[in-house]
Image: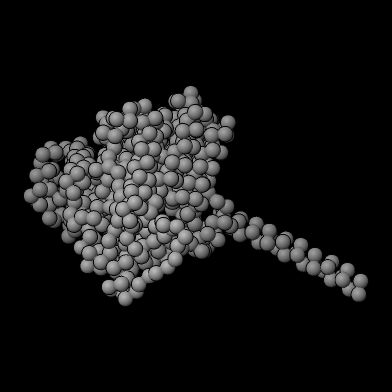
Amino acid sequence: MKSFFKIFFASLLAIIVFCLLAVFIIAWIVGSAMQPSKPNLGSKGVLVLDLSTSLNEQGQDNPINSFADKASYTPGLYDVVRMLHYAKYDSTIKGLYIKADDNSNGLAASEELLRAVQDFKGSKKFVIAYGETMSERAYYIASAADKVYCHPAGGMEWDGYAVTLAFVKNLLDKLEIQPEIFYAGKFKSATEPFRATEMTDPNRLQTSVWLGDLYNQLLQQISTTRGIDTAQLHQLASSGAIQTANDALKYRLVDGLKYDNDIKTELLQRLHQGNKEKVNFINLSTYAEAVDYKSTSGSKIAVVFAEGDIVDGKAQRGTIASDQYRDLLRKLRLDDDVKAIVLRVNSPGGSALASDVIANEVTLARKAKPVVVSMGDYAASGGYYISCSADSIFANASTITGSIGVFTMIPNLQSFFKNKLGITFDGVKTAEHADMMTVTRPLTQVERQFLQNNVDTTYNTFKQRVAAGRNKSMAYIDSIAQGRVWTGARGIPVGIVDRIGTLQDAIAAAAKMAKTSSYYTRDYPEPKGWLEQLLENVSNPSIKEDKIEEQLGKKSYQLLLQLKNVQSMMGTPQAKLPFNPDIK
């Protein structure tokens, strides 16, 4: 028997060792297969900027694509900007082709893409833009091209900006659902859809101002690139003069009407190739894998990408989780190799508590080394909360920021359950307010005061953070806070933004503050290993979400997400943008 166990355990150990070796060998083989040699770009390449591709702030790896012979890396916005700058000097790239049917990127991101296209044009290489039906947001970037073309039977959108909000108060009344709402700041309109049937006067005022700012920026940019007076551009939009592609040509918004084949013929001519040859189009994912567009020498500057809603606790995909970013900022603060930190914020906000956790780490980091914030499409409410303590704040002119205010809400569903569903509730409690956060009864007057006090205290803490970070008095901060939304351009005169500039401008400023002229950037959060990414992508719930979005359509899906986000507002103070404006 003793001999049996000896042989058994020896064999078991051998099997375990063999399995472990097999796992490591397979991992090594798969890992090698997933790191192929760099793509061959060929000659006379034309880089393609497809504006319909939505760019995240930070690039993303998808190992599954490697098995499907697709590019495994999806560039982020900062990657694209750097690649366009690299292509400016790359002899393989002869020109840039902008596909300008639609633009899935926000206005501030579009602003950075526009600057990158303008920088590329400094190479004297050609830039051609083409769209069959060109949206206004796509035209904003396309207008910088040498030539802008439209499909003869297509058209382009030129009718100004509009924002439409959905109000659900009447629906809640019919369902006998009573939302109990608490907020601080007269402009803090996040709960407005639940307590009003139309925009309040303060909200209409602030929306008119920031939307007007964005529209004026559009007019000024098109006026500069197309040489058309802003008054005429506004008149064209107001009168509905641009209805067809021929209208766009008549009023000099485009340079010609062409079919796809005509565009390819022109590109071949610019490349000095015959009409029967094929244009060597190079997409951004392929270019990212083929060239070394990232600097790797000099002092290290950490670029921390904070994109999505701000949430408490552990990391969730596509969010700014307080635990993760607290630990990351602390790590970078204590790392002597990191000479400066650039925090790229693209967030409408979220949990006020999570925002304060992250803001405290920004304050500590600022005491150790330069900290510069770069704002993307949104850095509002909680997004501004985590930004305000930096040494310097950069924003794009189109950035939506400010919204310094707090709210919370809890629905009373008692009548809904009783009168609509026939359900009643009863129970036992050991203290008067033990069931205060339940949705099955109304709050008492005392409990309402508890929640309002909590909101007011959080709002005061928020203003203190801003006052300390911006070196302003509490009275002044209160005057420009109140939940009011500002554009990046208007944020400078009110003192919540320091400079208009891109992420690259913010990085250059951080390097200057760190007293270094030679530097490279390292992106954070750091990408995970390929095996971890593979497992994450296989189990990724966003795959199901993509299917839902595909069935519902983008606008309906966004409305569904907003309804889902209502749950996060319940009972806990929120520092969040009133809404994610869908600017048409």
Asked whether residue 426 appears in the rendered view, the answer is yes
Give residue 110's quadrant in the image.
Answer: top left
| Place of residue 584 in the rendered image (x, y in percent of width and height, measured from the top left) | 22, 52
Residue 531's place in the image compared with 45, above or below, is below
Q: Nearer the viewer, residue 266 or 65?
A: 65
Residue 24's place in the image compared with 389, above or below, is below
- Name the residue located 7 percent from the left edge and 49 percent from the top edge: 239
- Name the residue located 18 percent from the left edge and 57 percent from the top edge: 197
Residue extending farthest to the left is: 239
Q: How many marks?
A: 0
Q: Nearer the viewer, residue 460 or 273?
A: 460
| Place of residue 445 in the rendered image (x, y in percent of width and height, measured from the top left) | 31, 53
Is residue 536 rendered to the left or right of residue 216? right
Residue 407's place in the image compared with 464, above or below, is below
Q: Nearer the viewer, residue 60 or 336?
A: 336
| Place of residue 471 in the rendered image (x, y in percent of width and height, measured from the top left) | 36, 27
Is residue 128 rendered to the left or right of residue 219? right
Residue extending farthest to the top is: 515
- Name the residue located 43 percent from the left edge and 41 percent from the top edge: 356
Q: Nearer the viewer, residue 385 or 421?
A: 421
| Place of residue 210 in the rendered image (x, y in percent of width and height, measured from the top left) | 22, 42
Q: Which of the image's four quarters has the N terminus? A: bottom right
Q: How is the image coloured?
A: one colour
Asked whether residue 41 appears in the rendered view, the answer is no
Give residue 198's quadrant in the image.
Answer: bottom left
